[in-house]
Amino acid sequence: MPMAEYIGPVARASTTSDVFNAVADMHRREILDALITGEKAVGAIVNDLSMSQPQVSKHLRVLSEVGLVKCRAEGRRRLYRLEPAHLRPLHDWVAKYEQAMNDRLDRMDDYLKELQRQGERQ
């Protein structure tokens, strides 16, 4: 294929209001993981993840824009907490594939039971 025809993947803006885009970034998933245990200040997240403060703040802004985290002020500190209800679109999408996987495992289980019955008859 000539190079002129290849367009390649186009990066989406990090500020898009799409939960899928927000969790596509490994660093943002790490921040969500850090917040699963409870509310944290930016400094605590920086220490947990060994990322720079500007990096953490940038990712927190994206996560806030899509509603995955909420921020509240406590004096001069900003505390962030996970808003798991906003993961619903991602959960619903993955659930379809989980059902398909479970259906396949059920069929495999039926097949293995049938093989076992055949082996017992011989």
Image (cartoon, rainbow, N blue to C red):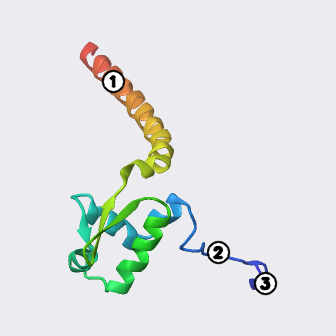
Q: Which residue is mark 1?
A: 115
Q: Which residue is mark 2?
A: 10
Q: Nearer the viewer, mark 3 or mark 1?
A: 3
The residue at the point 39 percent across, 69 percent down is: 28
User: Is 15 left or right of 57, judged from the image as shown?
Assistant: right
Q: Secondary structure at mark 1?
A: helix
Mark 2–mark 3 distance (CA, rounded to whole Å): 15 Å
Contact, mark 3 vs mark 1 (Cβ under 8 Å): no
User: Is 78 left or right of 20, judged from the image as shown?
Assistant: left
The amino acid sitting under disc 2 is Val
Label 3 environment density (alpha carbons within 10 Å; few <14, some 14–19, many ≥20): few
The residue at the point 37 percent across, 23 percent down is: 110
Quick one: 84 or 93, which is closer to the camera? 84
Mark 3–mark 1 distance (CA, rounded to whole Å): 55 Å
Q: Is residue 57 above or below residue 81?
A: below
User: Is 97 left or right of 44, judged from the image as shown?
Assistant: right
The residue at the point 38 percent across, 34 percent down is: 105
